[in-house]
Each structure stands twice: as C-alpha cells, then as structure tokens.
Amino acid sequence: MHVAVTGSSGLLGTALRAALTHDGHRVTRLVRRPPSAPDELAWSPAEGRVPTAALRDVDAVVHLAGEGIASRRWTAEQKRRIRESRTRGTRVLAEALAAADAGPRVLVCASAIGWYGDRGDEPLTEDSAPGTGFLAEVCQAWEAAADPAHAAGLRVVHLRIGIVQTPKGGALGRQLPVFRLAGAARLGSGRQYVSWVSLDDVVGVALFALSRDDVAGAVNVTAPNPVTNAEYTATLARALRRPVLPLGVPPVAPGLLLGRELAPELLYSSARVLPARALAEGYDIVDPLLVPALRRLLART
Ligand SMILES: NC(=O)c1ccc[n+]([C@@H]2O[C@H](COP(=O)([O-])OP(=O)(O)OC[C@H]3O[C@@H](n4cnc5c(N)ncnc54)[C@H](OP(=O)(O)O)[C@@H]3O)[C@@H](O)[C@H]2O)c1
C-alpha cells in the first residue's frame, strides 16, 4: 500500500510510520511546514489546502493530526484550537478526497474514547450511545467531519483510541517520572475506569483497519480488560517497585495545573470501553492484560 499520514510527527504517527515501512508499505507524510524530504507533501488544515493531485497514487490516508488535548490549560482559546484543529482538518481532508476523481479510497481517522463521556462502570461498545461533555462533543463533531468522504463512497474508519501506554510519551510517559520520584497515587476515589491500550495495539488496529476492506465506521481501540484507576495505580507502582500513597489526589490539585475543566474530564472521568468490533472482526490483541503489558513496556526503559 501507499499510505499518506497526517500528524506523522506525533506519538502515534511516528510508531505507525515505522510499522508501515517495516511491513514494506510506502509512506507519504502530509506536513504542515514546508516539505523537507521527498516523502513529504505540504497540507494546511487551517487554510484548507490538501495536495489532491499529488495524492493520486495514494491508496489510503491515516489522519492523526490534532492540537494536543492535554498540552496546555483549557482556556476558551485552547478549547477552540482543540476542536477546530480536529473538525476543520478532518473536513478539509474529507472534502478534498470526496471531490478527487482519483486517489485514496480509504480514510482512517483518529478519534478517542472521549466520545463516550463519563459513564461510570457501564461497559461501552461501539453500539453504546454518545456521551456528553467537552471531549465527547469534540469527538462526535470530529467523526461527523469525515461525512463528506463517507458520502462520496470512501471507506471511513474512526479509531476510538483509549489511553495509550508507552514509556515514550502520552499519559504513561508523563506519569513515570512523578511515580518514580514520589510514589504512586490514585486519582480521587480511584473507582473510575481507565480504558488503556498499548501503543503496539493502536498501531496494530490501524494496520488492521487499513488492510480489511470490510471494516468501516467506529472501532474502539482499547484493551479488552479496562481497570479502575486504583488498579492501574497499584499495578504501575508494583511494576516500578514504588509504594502506593495512602490518600487519593483530589481533583483540585491537578486542576491548579491543568485547569478546572481539563482535570475532571481527562483524569477523573470513567469510561469502561471494550474493543467489541476489533475482537469480532478477528484482530489478535497484542496486550490484553495490564500487568504483563506494563512489565513488557517498562522493561524497555
Ligand atoms: N496518545 C493518546 O493517548 C491518544 C488517545 C486517544 C486519541 N488520540 C488521538 O490520536 C491522534 C494522534 O495522537 P498522538 O498521541 O500521536 O498526538 P501528538 O503526539 O500530539 O501528535 C499529533 C500531531 O498532530 C499535529 N498537530 C499538532 N497540533 C496541531 C494543530 N493545531 N492542528 C493540526 N495538526 C496539529 C502534529 O503533527 P505535524 O506537525 O506533523 O502536523 C502532531 O505531531 C490525536 O488526534 C489524538 O487526539 C491520542
């Protein structure tokens, strides 16, 4: 396959590029800066520019680009950037692919389990109802922005990605130095569900979605065994040989750093998301259980 990737410099994009290349596929990077290598093409989600003509011999696009969800405090302006970078970028791409008379017929888009909102211990599959809250609304609008591609007959897949586990970055990458230094602390009651997924499984499901002509629509990208935050904290502490602190961290503490809205939505909300579709379609999960997954991932650090 010849695959174009947006957001290819990010945590997931870097891993996906490596896996695609390793498997013998050709990768073209859609970059927002001036291209600096033969495998790069410029696009501008903000200005609505997609190099449609240059994409004529591309089979599929994997769209990962978006403003970091937790990179800054959620001011009104930052929330706008988070929403617009996803809805506008996706719409621009979907409309360009829909209007092209040749080129990619497959669009695999990142989405997130934030789509389901804060749902306690309810098991959530792709058939569950949408949730509420800022992240849920962003995810729903993000997925809807790909409608023009779907309407034009492209195969569109929405990867509803869980909390990605890799020591290289993301939630785990940020937690490791803190846990190593100060010990592990659960967040609040620790009863909220953490729908984790290893980076290898995110890449695995993306490759699976690219290769399977019959897979379209939403696909949850999570491990089949989500755990509570208390279980997650205890497991990570054991893997790092660090103690678990007796008191949970109240929302007000990370709230001071991240903002009043971001901390509750991202750290204290509960989503018990199951990869029903991926399992039903025969995807073979690399890391189904947290204990061996963390042991394997942390052995590399
Ligand atoms: N990591 C997770 O745990 C996780 C969980 C659920 C969902 N996701 C979603 O999966 C996608 C990829 O995640 P990731 O962890 O790889 O993210 P990341 O490391 O933050 O990378 C995202 C990439 O998007 C591009 N980008 C940054 N700001 C942008 C903006 N304002 N407008 C347009 N593009 C922008 C950048 O690539 P270029 O500079 O190359 O354009 C950046 O490298 C994201 O949409 C994310 O929301 C991630």
Image (cartoon, rainbow, N blue to C red):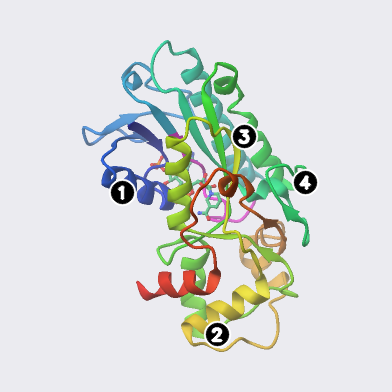
Left or right position of 103 against 228:
left
How far apart are the alpha carbons under marks 2 and 4? 33 Å
How far apart are the alpha carbons under marks 1 and 4? 35 Å
* Sequence-earlier tag: 2 or 4: 4
Q: Nearer the viewer, mark 1 or mark 4?
A: 1
Q: Kindly identify the amino acid type of the residue bearing the numbered disc 4.
A: Thr
Q: Which residue is mark 4?
A: 132
Query: Between residues 232 and 168, which one lies in front from this camera angle?
Result: 232
Q: Which residue is mark 1?
A: 18
Residue 24 pos. (x, y %): 26, 40
In this rendering, does residue 105 appear at all?
Answer: yes
For numbered disc 1, what is the local secondary structure?
Answer: helix
Magenta segment: does it hold 224? no
Please, what is the dominant secondary structure of the magenta stretch?
A: loop
Residue 179 pos. (x, y %): 52, 79
| Neighbours of disc 1 within 10 Å: few (<14), some (14-19), many (20+) | few
Q: Kindly identify the amino acid type of the residue bearing the numbered disc 3.
A: Glu
Mark 2–mark 4 CB contact (< 8 Å): no
For numbered disc 3, what is the local secondary structure?
Answer: helix
Give the label on residue 183, or none. Answer: 2
For numbered disc 2, what is the local secondary structure?
Answer: loop
Left or right position of 289 against 116:
left
How far apart are the alpha carbons under marks 3 and 1? 26 Å
Name the residue rendered at 56%, 89% in the picture: 243
Q: Kindly identify the amino acid type of the residue bearing the numbered disc 1.
A: Ala
Q: Which residue is mark 3?
A: 143
Name the residue rendered at 72%, 61% in the picture: 270
Q: Nearer the viewer, mark 2 or mark 1?
A: 1
Residue stretch rendered in magenta on the structure: 62-75
